[in-house]
Amino acid sequence: MLYKFGDKEPVIAKNAFIADTACLIGNVSIGEGTSVWFNTVIRADRAKISIGKNCSIQDNTIIHSDETDVEIGDGVIIGHSCVMHGRLIENNALIGMNATILHGAQIGDSAIIGAGALVPPGHKIPARSVVVGVPCKIVRMTSEEDLAMIRNTQNNYKKLTRQYLKI
């Protein structure tokens, strides 16, 4: 469902897939090739939420903006059941299932946030870092195998997006 809030309404690229049970509210923009899966809520009733190209926002995820805009770059994968209040997620980052990114946090390019991790308010995760835990801590830098896994996941979701658009 798409909901207008005040004078703002979601803007969605023509080749994006939005599941029929997802809710997009207010000042939301969704880029080309992006998929927003079942039961996801993207609520931009206070500030803008911009999601780039070829992202996968998976089932049951919640993205909400506080008083500052939320920007999600290109090729970002947000796993199932995440809670996102972060300010910035740079390109090709992977956010593991059930992770929580709190307000003002920033996630660097090609970083991996482990499943169930908690990124505290205002925390900045450097590019190509792998973080895990509650609260999160950097455990290593992303390897070539990690980057290949991100590319593989991106490609799998691009295929799924095309398949769902044909239904």
Image: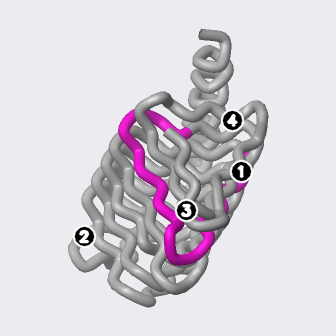
Q: Residues within 10 Å of mark 1 (few under 14, many from 20)?
A: some
Q: Earlier in the sequence, mark 4 or mark 3?
A: 3
- Determine the secondary structure under disc 4: loop
Q: Is residue 41 above or below residue 116?
A: above
Mark 1 vs 2, N-terminal side: 1
First reached walking from the N terminus: tag 1 or tag 4: 1
* Mark toward the viewer: 4 or 2: 4
SS at badge 1: strand
Dot 3 falls on a residue whose secondary structure is: loop
Mark drawn on residue 16: 4
Whichever of callouts 1 and 3 sits on the residue coming sooner in the sequence is 3
Tell me if I can see residue 141 in this picture.
no
User: Residue visible at 38% across and 71% down?
Assistant: 101
Residue 71, located in which quarter of the rendered image? bottom right
List the residue tagged with mark 1: 11
Front tag of 2 and 3 = 3
Give me the disc on residue 5. 3
Q: How many marks?
A: 4
For label 3, count other residues whose C-alpha is less than 10 Å away and answer few (under 14), some (14-19) or many (20+).
Answer: some
- Magenta part, dominant SS: strand
- Look at label 2 and name its amino acid: Gly
View extreme (top): residue: 167
Residue depicted at 58% across the width and 67% down the height? 6
* Residue denoted by label 2: 133
